[in-house]
Amino acid sequence: MIETLRSEKHLVDQAYDVILDALCDGTLKSGERITQEDIAARLNVSRQPVTHALAVLKSQGFLISSGRRGLTVAPVEMKFFAEIYQMRSVLEPLAVRLGCSRLSTSAIVKGRSIVEHGRNMMIAGDARASLQADVDFHSFIYELSGNALIGESLKLHWKHLRRAMGEVLRYPGMSISVWQEHGRIIEAMARGDGDAAADMMCKHIVSAAERIGFEANPAPGIEAESGEPGRIRKPSDRS
């Protein structure tokens, strides 16, 4: 359920953040009709801040106009998300390799803590907290790399990326494997095995896209776990 707003931030910003969270964690689903009156009532605010927040979300592609129905939640555009995952399959293994040389004892502790927290939130069934922990894990890797351009490149589409990650975490069985893979990546980095950790990260991203049906070719040089050149398969391709 969408939470009520707090007073620390401007109401428009608060409305935007809460609605975006609801889009990312699946509370508001693709094709669902959105009305200013309903959202304002849920958030216990006037229509004005909600109107502004919805306008921003529409301009960013999260909402679309549907004639007399007003605004509806935009469908998940598989091609767009596949392209995001393709970009991640190149940048995040690089971030892992760079991060291995900068990995301190305190960073290892922090990485393991994020993984443990995410796993606990997944077990508790808290989709929103699990998604935030997933974002925190990958943000941790970007920061650890020491290359600001990696984080900035993905930040351009970060809001949509949150929705894509939310789709991954809601896919049956995906949450368990996501946190197992995160844990293995951190442990490989802790051993100083940057090549293995980078390979794990690449497979983690490609398989996540594959399992929810994104149809796109992985970046050149990416291989599936079988060792054969991989591709993101259609759902009908899966056995």
Image: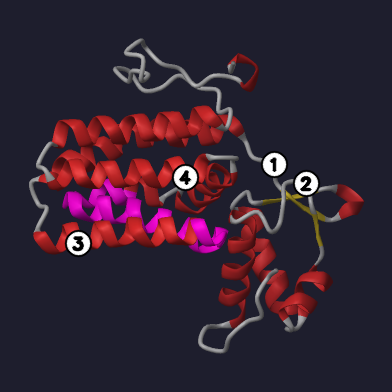
Residue 126 marker: none
Q: Which residue is mark 4?
A: 176
Q: Is 106 left, or right, of 148 in this rendering?
A: left
* Extreme residue in the top direction: 228
* Extreme residue in the front direction: 123
Magenta-colored span: 123-152
Q: Which residue is mark 3?
A: 109
Q: Which residue is mark 1?
A: 75
Place of residue 156 in the rendered image (x, y in percent of width and height, measured from the top left):
42, 49
Measure the alpha-carbon separation of dots 4 and 1. Answer: 26 Å
Quadrant of the snapshot with the N terminus: bottom right
Q: Is 221 left, or right, of 21 in this rendering?
A: left
Secondary structure beneath disc 4?
Answer: helix
- Residues at circles 2 and 1 in contact by the CB criterion of under 8 Å: yes
Place of residue 78 in the rendered image (x, y in percent of width and height, measured from the top left):
59, 32
- Residues at circles 3 and 4 in contact by the CB criterion of under 8 Å: no
Task: Give 112 or 2, whichever is nearer the viewer.
Answer: 112
Q: Is 196 left, or right, of 223 in this rendering?
A: left
Place of residue 93 in the rendered image (x, y in percent of width and height, measured from the top left):
25, 36
Secondary structure beneath disc 1?
Answer: loop
